[in-house]
Amino acid sequence: MEIQTTSRGTFAVWAYQQVKARMYGIDADAQLNILDNLKWTTGFSALRGDDLTNNEPLILMMPMSLRNSVELKLIRPSNFYIRLENENGFKQNRFPVRDQSVQFIDESGQLVTKTIDYSTPPAGFSIFHASIGADLFKNMNLNFRINNIFNKEYKEYLNRLRYYMPEPGRNFVVTLKYNF
């Protein structure tokens, strides 16, 4: 990674090289039907990557994640359902250090060198989503979803924009689906 200054500001420029690497992980999903119309679904993902060439953690490995949802589904009226979801992203504790030193002129006109931390991962997070939907007609379904219900500010480790801004806050999605 190097730092490049343009007319729009100073930005990190990433370059990659091939290394000998080892990666392994797990992705597990489970579903439990609590009642005929009530189910709990969970999923867990973990990934580990090692840069064997440089003897350090592999860069940009997804941190552990845990997902849970509870869904109530009623046959009448029209396959109505309501779902509450929880998404957890854990902090990535294995990462190589790629901090950069940058020189700039401060307010007093002095040349200053500062180290910019591009390596430290953001904190883990836990956010909630909800959705509700039903069939309107034989081949048509309407769904309303709220993502990030509590409008929590968080940053995803693998999102390069995390250096500049957080993930989207609360948002609403309406989906009208026609199957043909």
Image (cartoon, grey):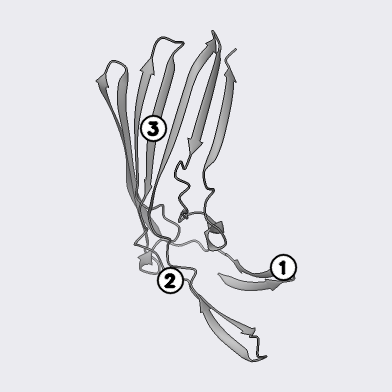
- Asked whether disc 3 touches disc 1, contact meaning CB atoms under 8 Å apart, the reply is no
**Rendering coords of residue 59 (x, y %):** 44, 61
Residue type at numbered disc 2:
Val
- Distance from label 3 to label 2 (Cα)? 38 Å
Q: Residues within 10 Å of mark 1 (few under 14, many from 20)?
A: few
Question: Considering only vertical position in the picture, is 77 above or below 30?
Answer: above
**Rendering coords of residue 23 (x, y %):** 36, 52
Residue found at the very far right of the displayed protein:
7
Callout 2 secondary element: loop
Callout 3 secondary element: strand
Residue found at the very far front of the displayed protein:
150
Q: Residues within 10 Å of mark 3 (few under 14, many from 20)?
A: some
Residue underneath mark 3: 84
- Distance from label 3 to label 1 (Cα)? 42 Å
Horizontally, is 174 left or right of 9 in the view? left
Which residue is located at x 48 percent, y 17 percent? 134
Horizontally, is 173 left or right of 57 in the view? right
Which residue is located at x 41 percent, y 24 percent? 82
Along the line of sight, which residue is nearer the eye, 154 or 18?
154
Which residue is located at x 55 percent, y 69 percent? 1
Residue underneath mark 2: 97
- Asked whether disc 3 touches disc 2, contact meaning CB atoms under 8 Å apart, the reply is no
Callout 1 secondary element: loop
- Which quarter of the rendering shows the C terminus? top right
- Distance from label 1 to label 2 (Cα)? 26 Å
Along the line of sight, which residue is nearer the eye, 71 or 91?
71
Question: Considering only vertical position in the picture, is 71 above or below 90?
Answer: above
Mark 1 vs 2, N-terminal side = 1
Residue type at numbered disc 3:
Leu
Residue 8 is labelled as 1
Mark 3 vs 1, N-terminal side = 1
Mark 3 vs 2, N-terminal side = 3
